[in-house]
Image: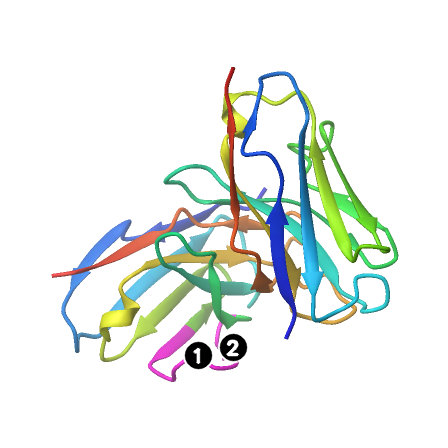
Amino acid sequence: QVQLQESGPGLVKPSQTLSLTCTVSGGSISSDPYYWSWIRQHPGKGLEWIGYIYYSGNTFYNPSLQSRISISLDTSKNQFSLKLKSVTAADTAVYYCARDFQEGAAAGTFDSWGQGTLVTVSS
Amino acid sequence: DIQMTQSPSSLSASVGDRVTITCRASQTISNSLNWYQQKPGQAPKLLIYDTSSLYSGVPSRFSGSGSGTDFTLTIDSLQPEDFAIYFCQQSYNTPRITFGQGTRLEIK
């Protein structure tokens, strides 16, 4: 069974770049045809899909964040990463990585999640 | 983007009760509606996908129905472990995926 684990700084200063990594175990991000997503949850609020990357490297981003984000694969480490630039306090959230449950399709249905990591934007 | 509105925002119930949570989409989404359960400090867990398909390992007391813009999640005979927050999510307009704001199910 695939497992995901987020890692990265818990505190980022305003205007800087937030960088997170998701390490995948029990599956290969370079050969298993799945879409890998980042999703965030503002404190006490609902969920916001950030974007995803396919095992081929193709990416799709939330239009509301598109100008500030990039998602990439590191196949040598079986990881995928999120970079969100020019952060503000509004980017404070728990960030989750997740996998789409349908092989080979962007079904937009997430059956495997990391535990989440809280990122606070503050000086 | 498609807006997802859940009601109620919070709900109190007792063990053994039957509860229903509603989710309404701002436009038709066919049957592309998923439900998740989230407990404090945990990631959401997929319960139901495509409106009514029960995800592997999810107890049969959970069920979903609806189509178009109106959907429901029903939990029969509430168990202590069911008290959590429930989110709906549309997967119709992929990749513009959107979630409801959540319904908090509390013990009465």
In this picture, residue A84 sits left or right of residue A39? right
Q: Position of residue B65 (x, y in %)?
A: 42, 73
Looking at the rendered structure, whether the residues under marks 1 and 2 are on a common chain is answered as: yes
Q: Position of residue A101 (x, y in %)?
A: 65, 69
Q: Is residue A41 magenta?
A: no
The range drawn in magenta is B51-64
- What separation in Å lies between label 1 and label 2 (alpha carbons)? 6 Å
Report the amino acid beneath label 1. Answer: Val
A79 shown above or below B108: above
Residue drawn at point x = 45 percent, y = 58 percent: B88
Report the amino acid beneath label 2. Answer: Tyr
Give the residue pinned by disc 1: B58
Give the residue pinned by disc 2: B55
Q: Quadrant of residue B106?
A: bottom left
Disc 1 is placed on an element classified as: loop
Q: Contact (CB < 8 A) between labels 1 and 2?
A: yes
B52 shown above or below B68: below
Residue drawn at point x = 76 percent, y = 65 percent: A34
Q: Residue furthest left?
A: B108
The subunit carrying tag 2 is: B
The quadrant in which the N terminus of chain A is found is: bottom right
Q: Tell which of A118 and B99 is nearer to you.
A: A118
Q: Is residue A108 visible?
A: no
Are there few (<14), some (14-19), or many (20+) residues within 10 Å of tag 2?
Answer: some
Q: Residue furthest bottom?
A: B60
Q: Position of residue A19 (x, y in %)?
A: 68, 34
Q: Count the labels in the image.
A: 2
